[in-house]
Amino acid sequence: MTSPHAQHLTWDDLDDLLMGTERSSVHVHLETCAECRKLAAADLDLVVQIQRLPQLSPRPGFADRVMAGVVAVEPARLPVRPSARPWLKAAAAVLTLGSLGTSLGWSLANQSLLIALRSDAIAAMKGTAAQLLQAIGGLSQSAVVAALRDTVGGVGVGLLVTAIAAAYLAGLLSLQRLVTVPGRAP
């Protein structure tokens, strides 16, 4: 309490009262303020009840066990994946190259079959295009239909070859992705 005219006691004043080091102004205030007398009595009662509690001690060796746990704790480690074996990588590379070589070898050995398949595909596409154009309006003799027929023949073959090459490349990339052994993350 800073002055005798202050309204109520502070927590420091209550602590001083419990320790017996209070100032005379605290006693003057307690004589005139019932609220502070009640608070001081409750504070004293709490201290007395705490002093009556049984004294509990930790079991013998408690501090040693805690310190041993603190000192022995190691930082958490992430599980380490074993690296891919070199022979597994080599086998995957041989398999991929063998597949590509086999495909290339078959294509070179069967060129006459591939040319026949190409010719049959071109003929089928031309026939389908002609039927489609005739079905559109029976305009088979007009110059527009003839130009479309000639265009579909050349462009259609180019589109077919492009589609087959794109599918082959997509297959190779997919195979490479599936065969590649994942490495360790940095």
Image (spheres, rainbow, N blue to C red):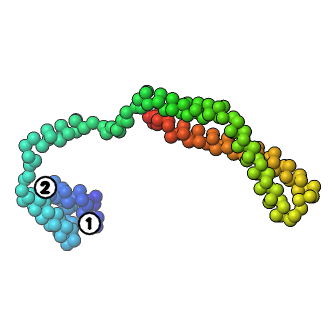
Residue 136 in the image: above or below residue 59: below
- Say which residue label 1 marks: 8
Q: Which residue is drawn at the image coordinates 81% and 45% (left, top)? A: 154
Question: Which quadrant of the view contains residue 84?
Answer: top left
Q: Nearer the viewer, residue 103 or 86?
A: 103
In the image, is 18 to the left or to the right of 152?
A: left
Q: Position of residue 69 (x, y in %)?
A: 20, 39
User: What residue is shown at x 86% (from left), y 49% (from top)?
Assistant: 150
* Residue 111 tag number: none
**Image quarter hosting the N terminus:** bottom left
Q: Is residue 11 above or below residue 152?
A: below
Local crowd size for mark 1, using a 10 Å CA cut-off: few (<14), some (14–19), many (≥20): some
Q: Is residue 104 visible?
A: no
- Identify residue type, mark 1: His
- Measure the C-alpha gap from mark 2 to mark 1: 18 Å
Place residue 61 in its image quadrant: top left
